[in-house]
């Protein structure tokens, strides 16, 4: 890409490889820790390897943000070919990544870095990167992205409450009741990374149409993608349905990465979108 500015994000954007190349986007990985072993998200460990290991694990892995030094290193390299950069990151309520980016940027003199708190997680960040990449200047990109931050949504359907319970987001009793009744929670992450329950549906076969129905009530949207954690067939099915309804939109299918996957667990499905 022959832009005067660079576009940077982190691995929680679940950015499709094809977009990374098409739009020339730089990714700084977060880390996942299983006990004393550290893996860079999507560099040392793929999503598939992560979920295989997660299912076998008795305790949740932890995640950590990149260091300011890692960001400074990336910005210094980009400064050789660009006048500035926009750096779009996971919501500050969810991670210290954006703060590390800000500190890293201060260490690089004479290179303008606009750090954006996306207030969200997963592919809405990739949408923001794509918006930025299609702009002509850093100022235009920053304005276009900031305007859309409050319109990012993540609608997630979890297959189990086990991982929320292990992560301390749910009491054991709540998780047990949910599991006994086989409840599938539908959660919405809206502005300021607020997580709201939308519904709890008895079975997965009912929960998927309910998720699509809720999404329809949120239309019109600027863009949408289907996310999954080892549930590719169902993701394809949902994407096929939406492509028939929204023929003008490119509706990619993305894999939930290690960081978000720590809380969703395997077999999660998601609809991620920017409201118009």
Image (tube, rainbow, N blue to C red):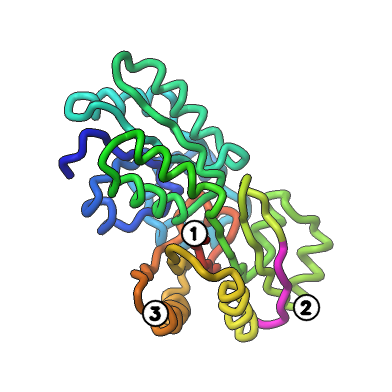
Q: Is residue 229 visible?
A: no
Q: Which residue is disc 1 drawn over? A: 274
Q: Secondary structure at mark 3?
A: helix
Q: For residue 106, which quarter of the picture?
A: top left
Q: For residue 177, which quarter of the picture?
A: bottom right
Q: Is residue 151 visible?
A: yes
Q: Is residue 23 left or right of residue 206?
A: left
On screen, residue 145 above or below 263: above
Q: Which residue is disc 3 drawn over? A: 243
Identify the magenta region.
Answer: 197-203
Between disc 3 and disc 1, whose residue precedes?
A: 3
**Disc 1 residue crowd, few under 14, some 14–19, many 20+, Cα 10 Å:** many
Residue occupying image coordinates x 43% and y 66%:
225
Between disc 2 and disc 1, whose residue precedes?
A: 2
Residue 58 image position (x, y, % from top left):
62, 55
Disc 2 from disc 1: Cα separation: 33 Å
Q: Is residue 80 left or right of residue 266?
A: left
Return the mark for residue 17.
none
* Residue closer to the observer: 112 or 235: 112
Residue occupying image coordinates x 62% and y 56%:
189
| Residue 11 falls within the magenta-colored stretch | no
Q: Nearer the viewer, mark 2 or mark 3?
A: 3
Residue 256 image position (x, y, % from top left):
46, 60
Return the mark for residue 181.
2
């Amino acid at each position: 890409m022959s832009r005067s500015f660079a576009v940077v994000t982190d691995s929680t954007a679940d950015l499709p490889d094809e977009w990374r190349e098409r739009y020339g986007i730089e990714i700084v990985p977060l880390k996942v820790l299983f006990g004393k072993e550290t893996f860079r998200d999507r560099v040392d460990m793929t999503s598939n390897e992560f979920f295989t290991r997660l299912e076998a694990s008795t305790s949740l892995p932890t995640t950590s943000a990149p260091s300011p030094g890692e960001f400074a290193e990336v910005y210094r390299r980009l400064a050789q070919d660009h006048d500035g950069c926009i750096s779009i990151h996971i919501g500050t309520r969810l991670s210290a990544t954006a703060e590390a980016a800000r500190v890293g940027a201060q260490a690089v003199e004479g290179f303008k870095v606009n750090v954006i708190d996306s207030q969200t997680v997963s592919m809405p960040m990739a949408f923001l990167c794509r918006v930025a990449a299609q702009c002509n200047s850093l100022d235009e990109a920053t304005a276009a992205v900031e305007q859309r931050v409050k319109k990012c949504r993540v609608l997630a359907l979890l297959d189990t409450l086990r991982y929320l319970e292990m992560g301390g987001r749910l009491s054991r009793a709540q998780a047990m009741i949910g599991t006994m009744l086989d409840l599938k929670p539908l959660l919405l992450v809206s502005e300021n990374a607020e997580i709201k329950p939308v519904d709890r549906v008895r079975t997965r076969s009912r929960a998927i149409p309910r998720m699509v129905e809720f999404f329809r009530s949120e239309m019109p949207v600027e863009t949408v993608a289907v996310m999954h954690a080892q549930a590719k067939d169902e993701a394809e099915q949902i994407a096929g349905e939406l492509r028939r309804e929204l023929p003008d939109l490119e509706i990619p299918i993305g894999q939930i990465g290690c960081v978000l996957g720590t809380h969703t667990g395997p077999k999660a499905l998601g609809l991620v979108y920017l409201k118009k």
